[in-house]
Image (cartoon, rainbow, N blue to C red):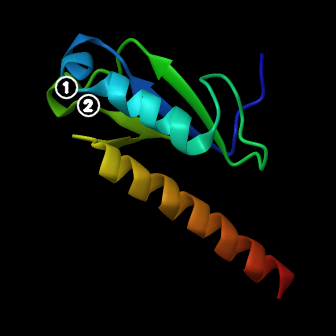
């Protein structure tokens, strides 16, 4: 068992998501976060995993973030999701210091 980040991004790479560009999304997440599937970012905020199916084929490509499904994902939507989570972490840290 490897530790996971606080926010686990699960990429569906099943057939329906694959034909809609899930491999591009996985590559994008790897590039943006600087980690490979199974690794954790140095700040402990993110980890990436990929699965064969999340069971929501009609909504693909799907990215689940801590169990919440994000449908019809695009690189732009994925970037915004990662930025939003990162921003929330920064705000939480500032509130904890106050």
Residue at 25%, 22% (x, y): give it: 17
The disc placed on residue 65 is none
- Let me know if residue 67 appears in the view: no
Quadrant location of the C terminus? bottom right
Residue identifier under label 1: 20
Sequence order check, earlier mark of 2 and 1: 1
Residues tagged 2 and 1 counted as in contact (Cβ below 8 A): yes
The total of numbered circles placed on residues is: 2
For residue 18, above or below residue 91? above
- Let me know if residue 76 appears in the view: yes
**Quadrant of residue 64 in the image?**
top left
Compared across the picture, whether 12 is left or right of 20 comes to right
Residue at 48%, 20% (x, y): give it: 50
For residue 38, above or below residue 45? above
The disc placed on residue 61 is 2
For residue 23, above or below residue 71? above
Residue 6, percent from left and from top? 68, 45
Residue 12, percent from left and from top? 37, 23
Q: Residue furthest right?
A: 97
**Quadrant of residue 46 in the image?**
top right
Residue 3, percent from left and from top? 77, 29
Disc 2 from disc 1: Cα separation:
6 Å
Question: Which secondary structure, mark 1?
Answer: loop
């Amino acid at each position: 068992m490897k530790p996971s980040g606080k926010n686990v991004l699960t990429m569906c790479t099943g057939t329906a998501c694959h034909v809609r560009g899930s491999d591009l999304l996985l590559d994008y997440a790897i590039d943006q976060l600087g980690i490979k599937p199974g690794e954790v970012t140095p700040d402990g905020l993110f980890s990436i995993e990929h699965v064969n199916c999340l069971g929501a084929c009609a909504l693909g490509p799907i990215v689940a973030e801590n169990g919440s499904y994000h449908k019809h994902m695009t690189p732009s939507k994925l970037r915004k999701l990662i930025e939003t989570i990162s921003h929330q972490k920064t705000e939480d840290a500032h509130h904890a210091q106050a």
